[in-house]
Image (tube, helix red, strand yellow):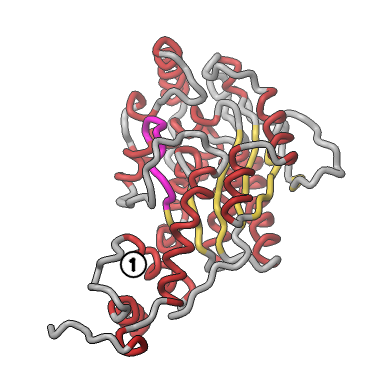
Amino acid sequence: MTALEDSLRNKIDRKTKPPGSLGRLEDIAFKIGMIQQTLTPELRYPTVLIFAGDHGLTEEGVSPYPREVTGQMVMNFLEGGAAINVFCRHNGLKIRVVDAGVDYDFPEELDLVHAKVEHGTRNVLKEPAMSTETCIRALDKGREVLGDVERGGCNVVGFGEMGIGNTSSAALLMHKFTGFPMEKCVGRGTGLDDAGVRHKTDILKQAADKYSVSDPLEIMAVFGGLEIAMMTGAMLEAKARKLTLLVDGFISTAALAAAHHMDGSIMDNTIFCHASDESGHRLMLKHLHVKPVMDMGMRLGEGTGVAVAFPVIRAAVGFLNEMASFDEAGVADRDC
């Protein structure tokens, strides 16, 4: 145990409470203190990044919604009308929406991070979703986006997404990175019925069997989405810059799984905000040996799990910094 670890544990245990009585809040406080390497951590300019991109695989009917919805939802984010906007407004988080690869040309004057690499991925059932070069460009763009946010003073960043068809891409990534059978990775996405889930599973099995790749970059290029690749790059850069990463649900966790294969230490900086009801997410969390902050039966995406969990994370830092110790309060500690 390092000197800082010992000091943080002692500070937490010496608060006016029985040891361990604040449960997971104590774990979160300790983790953020270790990330920031201080006994008095702070959450500065918390920001949710929403990465948006379209997917060629939607040609195969893996989603009940048309791909045009991706661009329409980006406009909804920018106009403040989505669930993520509501939760961020209530809980004090800033939003930055990133066009990673939406099949629509947004006006330049919009308050949007214009980082488009291509107008969506290709149909992975017929060809790789991206070339390796395109995937690298998306990863690098993600690093740039994160760098811009960090230079604005942010030290805690949440990761969300938007992309019709991206639960299919995430399921393929989960299958390849974890080895779980495809049936365990595929869920209802934006609301498929049982027949739709069976069709989606069949399509994804065909796509998974078509390619033999094992390198993390190749897996992302073949099966990933532009928004997922860009998110992965941003996550890697957040770790490099010693930020706290707040991960949302199924798609964001698939991006984190990819990042974990590229940098095993990224887990040291990562807090998983909720257990999504999208099939596969709980298995992925178990595979990563992590416990989420909350379980509310949500599966919307957008970063909503981050925004709803953030008050809990803020409370953890608050008690560490503001709660009196036994000595400060003049309260007698237990005898042993």
Name which residue type carries label 1. Answer: Glu
Give the labeled residue for mark 1: 26
- In the structure shown, which secondary structural element does the residue marked by tag 1 occupy? helix
Picture residue at 30% right of the left edge, 78% below the top: 16
Q: Nearer the viewer, residue 95 or 270?
A: 95
Query: Looking at the picture, does residue 36 appear above or below residue 325?
Result: above
Q: Quadrant of residue 63?
A: top right
Picture coordinates of residue 7, whole percent (x, y): 34, 83
* Left or right: 79 as drawn, with respect to 19: right
Quadrant where the image shows the C terminus? bottom left
- Main SS, magenta region, reads loop
Determine the image quadrant of residue 195.
Answer: top left
Q: Residue furthest top?
A: 195
Apparent side of residue 210 relative to residue 334 in the rendered image (left or right): right
Q: Residue at x 73, y 45 (%)?
A: 115
Q: Residue at x 70, y 34 (%)?
A: 76
Looking at the rendering, which quadrant does residue 181 occupy? Answer: top left
Residue 176 appears in view: no
Numbered range of the magenta stretch: 272-280
For residue 252, above or below residue 66: below
Crowding at mark 1 (Cα within 10 Å: few <14, some 14-19, many 20+): many
**Picture quarter with the N terminus:** bottom left
Q: Is residue 38 magenta?
A: no
Q: Is residue 246 visible?
A: yes
Q: Residue at x 67, y 60 (%)?
A: 149
Residue 58 at x, y = what percent?
Answer: 59, 20
305 or 224, which lies in front?
A: 305
